[in-house]
């Protein structure tokens, strides 16, 4: 039988651009999975999308599903009749169809179930109908009197099986929409039905009908024409892959047009122009590389016109001018507020809730300022500048521009703070302190920005830890995992050593005390209002007096144990994020655990350096074998200490050594210790690990030639103390007991 190809097109009203790529993938998966499950395999498949259609082409499908024979084991031959009848019903057979076989467990009934193959057309119709009726659109609608739901009204279904003998329409009807072999071209430029014979014929005729089927081809054409037009004017198009993909989903026949931005708006920040044009109009920004200003825009029409797009461009420019006039108004108003010192914005933050338990944005700013000042010396920032930057960093949240374009928060703060005449380092912190927002974003590098960014993230982590709003499972509504990763990346990628315990503990204690004061004040306020509303009768006054008396005795101070417990728990959470961060770099979890067990594990940069050095060491033969030698020494020593009830931790003397290998180990340990001790003090973990790995050969030789548990008591004690030196020297580098293998 000839091997058929399958062509499917679902033609509808406009599909939202951001749904198209996923929808094409869903169509491919649902149909191909359904065909394979029904026994209809294929050679290859590809899916495409335009604003009005989803298309699937499948090559090399079977003409029919194969006949299958399934053997099914049933009950015993002497089983109750009802059990046998149940088996027969499930198998769809009669008693005559069963075979009785002797087995070690007695006579058992077996059935052979034959499922005849089905023609491809029958299977395709069944699978496609199920796919259409159950398609996973994020949103869908009904239309007319039918029951079918689709993202937009579905107009036609093209479904043909193609062989060398020709194309066969797959017979099917869904809610009155019968499958056929026709489609539509461009809505305006090539209206009317198009009959197709196969996929190549389909794509060729669509192209002639002004439809580019492949979204990537539309995107490439848009970018090619846009960059060429900009280049001809000495300009450049601002790259935006997301916008390009979205615009490619808005047009079937892209026509690129370049327009000019009115001179009145060229003084706006380029980011404002870019954001306004992108969000409101789906325009690409065109930049003058010499000045850095956005001077023109690219729009993409969905048709060719007799005037080469002049009317379309004029309409777009008119709408854009209205939008930019609003942006200019916001910009000028905001500049007046900024030049006045931002007092109005800072006051406004007192009325903006950050979290109902953690206070207002103004409360957040106060905590950030205190933390930034404390962190500043450790990251090389000026404390006064860090505090000032933290106090101004979120002022732009109250600006008109950020209200209109929330995605510009921080960036507009930088512009406004610069307009005030503040130091550029302070202004930069307004933009940088949110970073990094994702795992691939750049981290802030300027000292003041680093201090404020760390303060913002530490406050977020400690705040939600204080109110017990920690991430659970996959849920992380306050993006605390992202905040922890941000702290890690800022410290590690800037090579900064900061002991986190101190700022975390300070902020936790402050937050706990503040929360308790706020709770008491809230209760007292409610009681006072109640008493006032009742006219303060005797019973209400008495109740109020007793409550206030009990509140006065409340201990507001967060105790050390409480703060320490939360501090430890939060640090463990950060360590967990660090494991994920380092795991992606190829460092094993047990290596990280071995380093976390060491002192100063709240210095994440120090911790990472230690882990990387240990990981590199363990990748060598000496390092890997040393671990085995260390574990052997540790096991022997631990067993001896348990049996003897003493600790062998000092007193190894080379004068009691009886073999050359024993004496060589003493010498090697002395040499290694002399290298490791200063290296650890200097945080030179590579040197320390290398010195430790150098012990592999003398330790191996020692265990090969020497029996630790000698009959001579003095020699045995000396050798055990020698093993203790191995343990002490190795554990000074990392807790090697946690290394697996």
Image: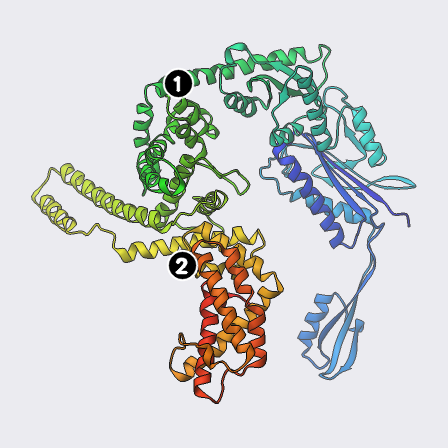
Please tell me which residue is depicted at 55% across the width and 41% down the height of the picture. Answer: 440
Between circles 1 and 2, the one closer to the viewer is 2
Real-space Cα distance between discs 1 and 2? Answer: 50 Å
Name the spot of residue 301 as percent of width and height, x first.
67, 20
Determine the image quadrant of residue 402. top left
Residue farthest left in this picture: 538
Name the spot of residue 306 as percent of width and height, x first.
73, 11
Q: Nearer the viewer, residue 228 or 619?
A: 619
Residue tagged 1: 335
* Residue 346 against residue 380 in the figure, above or below: above
Name the spot of residue 38 as percent of width and height, x first.
76, 54
Q: Nearer the viewer, residue 43 or 662?
A: 662
Answer left or right for 253 relative to 667.
Answer: right
Name the spot of residue 128 as percent of width and height, x first.
73, 44
Which secondary structure lies at badge 1?
helix
Residue 599 shows which numbered tag?
A: 2
Where is the C terminus found, in terms of image quarters?
Answer: bottom right
Answer left or right for 350 relative to 230.
Answer: left
Please tell me which residue is depicted at 56% across the width and 56% down the height of the picture. Answer: 587
**Residue 144 shows in the view:** no
Residue farthest front in this picture: 655
Determine the image quadrant of residue 161. top right
Of labels 1 and 2, earlier in sequence is: 1
User: Dot 1 surroundings within 10 Å: few (below 14), some, or many (20 or more)?
Assistant: some
Which secondary structure lies at badge 2?
loop
């Amino acid at each position: 039988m000839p091997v058929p190809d399958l062509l499917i097109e679902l033609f509808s009203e406009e599909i939202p651009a951001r749904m198209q790529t996923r929808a094409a993938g869903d169509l491919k998966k649902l149909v191909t999975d359904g065909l394979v499950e029904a026994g209809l395999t294929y050679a290859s498949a590809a899916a495409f999308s335009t604003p009005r259609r989803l298309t699937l082409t499948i090559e090399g499908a079977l003409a029919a599903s194969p006949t299958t024979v399934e053997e099914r084991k049933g009950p015993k031959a002497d089983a109750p009749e009802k059990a046998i009848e149940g088996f027969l019903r499930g198998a769809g057979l009669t008693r005559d169809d069963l075979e009785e076989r002797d087995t070690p467990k007695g006579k058992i009934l077996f059935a052979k179930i034959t499922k005849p193959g089905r023609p491809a057309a029958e299977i395709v119709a069944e699978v496609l109908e199920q796919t259409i009726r159950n398609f996973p659109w994020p949103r869908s609608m009904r239309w007319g009197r039918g029951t079918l739901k689709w993202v937009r009204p579905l107009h036609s279904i093209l479904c043909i099986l193609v062989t060398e003998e020709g194309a066969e329409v797959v017979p099917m009807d869904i809610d009155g929409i019968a499958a056929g072999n026709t489609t539509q071209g461009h809505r305006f430029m090539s209206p009317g039905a198009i009959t197709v014979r196969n996929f190549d014929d389909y794509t060729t005729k669509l192209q002639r009908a002004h439809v580019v089927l492949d979204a990537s081809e539309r995107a490439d054409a848009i970018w090619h024409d846009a960059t060429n037009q900009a280049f001809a004017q000495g300009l450049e198009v601002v790259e935006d892959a997301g916008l390009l993909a979205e615009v490619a989903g808005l047009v079937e026949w892209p026509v690129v047009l370049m327009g000019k931005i009115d001179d009145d708006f060229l003084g706006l920040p380029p980011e404002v122009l870019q954001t306004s044009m992108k969000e409101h109009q789906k325009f690409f920004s065109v930049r003058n590389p010499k000045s850095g200003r956005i001077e023109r825009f690219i729009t993409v029409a969905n048709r060719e016109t007799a005037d080469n797009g002049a009317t379309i461009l004029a309409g777009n420019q008119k709408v854009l001018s209205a939008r930019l006039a609003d942006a200019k108004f916001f910009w000028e108003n905001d500049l007046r507020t900024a030049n006045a010192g931002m007092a109005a914005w800072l006051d406004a933050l007192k009325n903006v809730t950050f979290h109902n338990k953690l206070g207002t944005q103004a409360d957040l700013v106060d905590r950030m300022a205190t933390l930034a000042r404390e962190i500043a010396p450790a990251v090389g920032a000026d404390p006064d500048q860090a505090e000032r930057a933290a106090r101004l960093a979120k002022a732009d949240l109250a600006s008109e521009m950020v209200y209109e374009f929330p995605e510009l928060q921080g960036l507009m703060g930088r512009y406004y703070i610069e307009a005030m005449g503040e130091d550029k380092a302070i202004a930069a912190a307004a933009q940088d302190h949110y970073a990094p927002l994702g795992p691939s974003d750049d981290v802030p590098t300027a000292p003041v920005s680093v201090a404020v960014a760390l303060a913002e993230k530490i406050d977020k982590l400690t705040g939600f830890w204080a109110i017990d709003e920690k991430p659970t499972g996959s849920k992380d509504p306050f993006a605390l995992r992202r905040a922890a990763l941000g702290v890690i990346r800022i410290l590690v990628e800037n090579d900064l050593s900061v002991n986190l315990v101190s700022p975390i503990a300070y902020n936790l204690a402050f937050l706990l005390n503040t929360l308790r004061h706020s709770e008491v004040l809230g209760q007292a306020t409610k009681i006072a209002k109640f008493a006032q509303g009742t006219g303060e009768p005797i019973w209400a006054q008495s109740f109020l007096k007793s409550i206030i008396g009990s509140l006065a005795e409340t201990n507001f101070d967060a105790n050390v144990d409480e703060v320490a417990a939360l501090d430890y728990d939060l640090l463990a959470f950060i360590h967990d994020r660090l494991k994920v961060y380092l795991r992606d770099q190829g460092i094993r979890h047990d290596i990280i655990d071995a380093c976390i067990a060491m002192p100063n594990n709240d210095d994440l940069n120090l911790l990472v350096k230690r882990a990387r050095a240990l990981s590199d060491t363990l990748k060598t033969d000496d390092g890997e074998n040393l671990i085995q030698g260390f574990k052997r020494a540790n096991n022997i020593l631990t067993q001896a200490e348990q049996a003897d009830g003493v600790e062998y931790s000092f007193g190894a003397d080379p004068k009691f050594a009886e073999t050359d290998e024993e004496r060589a180990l003493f010498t090697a340990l002395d040499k290694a210790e002399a290298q490791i001790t200063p290296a650890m003090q200097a945080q030179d973990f590579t040197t320390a690990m290398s010195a430790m790995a150098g012990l592999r050969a003398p330790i191996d030789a020692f265990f090969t030639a020497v029996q630790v548990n000698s009959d001579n008591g003095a020699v045995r004690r000396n050798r055990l103390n020698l093993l203790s030196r191995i343990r002490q020297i190795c554990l000074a580098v990392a807790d090697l007991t946690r290394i697996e293998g």
